Image (cartoon, rainbow, N blue to C red):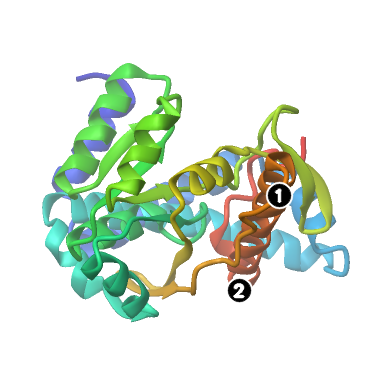
Amino acid sequence: MRGKGALLELFRRFVRPGWRADMVAAFFSGGLRCIAPRKNVALENLRQAYPESDEKWRRETVRKCYGHLSWMVAEYLSLVSRPEEVLSWVISAEGKDILDELKAAGKGCIILAGHVGNWELLAAWLAQSGYPLTAVVRNPDDPELAELIEDYRRRSGVGTFEKHFIMKEAVRFAKGGGFLGLLPDQAWNSSGIQGPFFGRSCFTAAGPAAMAHLAGVPVVPVVSYRIAPFRHRVIISPPLPLRTEGDRGDILRENTLRMNEAIEKMVRISPEQWLWFHRRWK
């Protein structure tokens, strides 16, 4: 194993909750602040999403974002070796009865999440809690790194569909009682649905709305926020009120925008725990 994969595996073997995790998080935080990847992109995104904010708040939010990502790495690498420990790291799970009732009834659903909080830890918590989760992912372009991360997810009990999978497989999975994890908060091309996100027009993939419509399953917003290192709060909201009747194009548009609204609400609760570094509004 070489390159990024070797470095990641080295940290995984070293890290544990406690002083070792502190060291790993400090290492990544220092590197991110020094290199400051996409800092200007994040500042501009924050300026337009929060036009009432001042420069000091925006810079502080970006600084916290770097710290958040650093702790994501330390936490996730810690849980790969001991995935069952994630159950104790989530100190509260509001709305868990919603998922329990779906599972008990053998009904599938779409878990609507975003790149908010520690989404990899959230997926591991869902899997370790006994929910039949398979997440739609986009693996890194580096084949070796992609294989390693896929192995990490398997160890955590998380199944995956590659982002360019056949939609009918995902629909069949959800229809059969599976919990399909989707994170549709990244930029999309002009083939998607155009509409507002933080008051700014952008394109969003129509796939999640199409899968929900075809599978006939509820869309349940789920998010996890870090309260402190290795202490998280999961919030499971009631299923979104989706449109089911009428023109298919109108159904997809309206339901996609409702998903956007749900994710925006997640971000506004803790903006420093979202990925402001990508060009969502390109």
Name the spot of residue 3 as percent of width and height, x first: 31, 21
Q: Residues within 10 Å of mark 2 (few under 14, many from 20)?
A: few
The N terminus appears in which quarter of the rendering? top left
Q: 252 and 160: which one is in front?
A: 252
- Whether 4 is drawn above or below 221: the answer is above
Does the image show residue 248? yes
Pointer 1 residue: 246
Identify the residue under disc 2: 269
Residue at x 58% of width, y 50% of height = 275
Residues tagged 1 and 2 counted as in contact (Cβ below 8 A): no
Left or right of residue 183, residue 106 in this image: left
Q: In this rendering, which labeled residue sits more in front, label 1 or label 2?
A: 1
Query: Which amino acid type is shown beneath numbered disc 1?
Result: Gly
Residue 86: image quadrant is bottom left
Name the amino acid type tagged 2: Ile
Q: Quadrant of residue 233?
A: bottom left
245 lies above or below 170: below
Question: Residue 58: image x %, image y %?
Answer: 74, 61
**Quarter of the figure that contains the C terminus:** top right
